[in-house]
Image: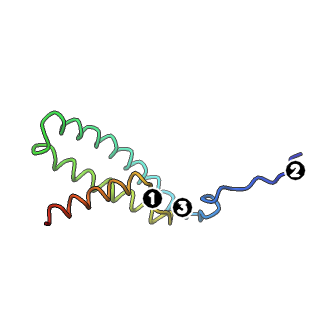
Amino acid sequence: MPTVIPTHPEIAAAAQPLSWPDMARVLILLACVRWLNRRLQAVNRRVVRYGFDIAGTDLALTMQRWLACHEAIGALLGRPEPSHVAQVRATLQKGAERKSR
């Protein structure tokens, strides 16, 4: 018989239960993120092969969809976006600031 009661991680304690429609939406968004990850790999290969001028618009549009999915997941779960998503968002914002100058 255990003498210590297991504690839940902080993130699990802060999580709120989702309704069934919200849970379905999160699962659909996660599937979209996985699909977009594969699409990003394919687009990246095209950019490497043909150059950014030819294949860059696909990369930008796919990246915007990827960021939107992560933003929606974060809003549904009430959690901040993962660090790798925040890095991509910051990199794109820096690029937009450079273009506007």
Decide which of 52, 35 is in the foreground and name it: 52
**What's the distance in space between the residues labelled 1 and 2, CA to CA?**
40 Å
Report helix, strand or loop for mark 3: helix
Q: Quadrant of the C terminus?
A: bottom left
Horizontal side of residue 4 vs 87, given as left or right: right
The residue to which callout 1 is attached is 25
- Residue at the location (40% across, 62% down)? 72
**Residue at the farthest top position:** 49
Q: Quadrant of residue 86?
A: bottom left
Q: Residues within 10 Å of mark 3 (few under 14, many from 20)?
A: few
Q: Residue at x 59, y 62 (%)?
A: 15
Q: Position of residue 32 (x, y in %)?
A: 37, 50
* Whole-number angstrom distance, CA of label 3 to CA of label 1: 9 Å
Image quarter of residue 53 = top left
Q: What's the residue type where badge 2 is placed? A: Thr
- The mark nearer the N terminus, 3 or 1, is 3
Whole-percent x, y for residue 11 in the image = 60, 59
Q: Secondary structure at mark 1?
A: helix
Left or right placement of residue 27 versus residue 65 in this view: right
Q: Which numbered disc covers residue 20?
A: 3
- What residue type is disc 3 on? Trp
The answer to whether residue 67 is above or below residue 48 is below
**Lower sequence index among marks 2 and 3:** 2
Name the residue type under label 1: Arg
| Mark sitting on residue 3 | 2
Q: Pointer 2 and pointer 3: residues touching (CB < 8 Å)?
A: no
Q: Quadrant of the N terminus?
A: top right
Numbered tag placed on residue 14 in the rendering: none
Disc 1 or 2, which lies upstream in sequence? 2
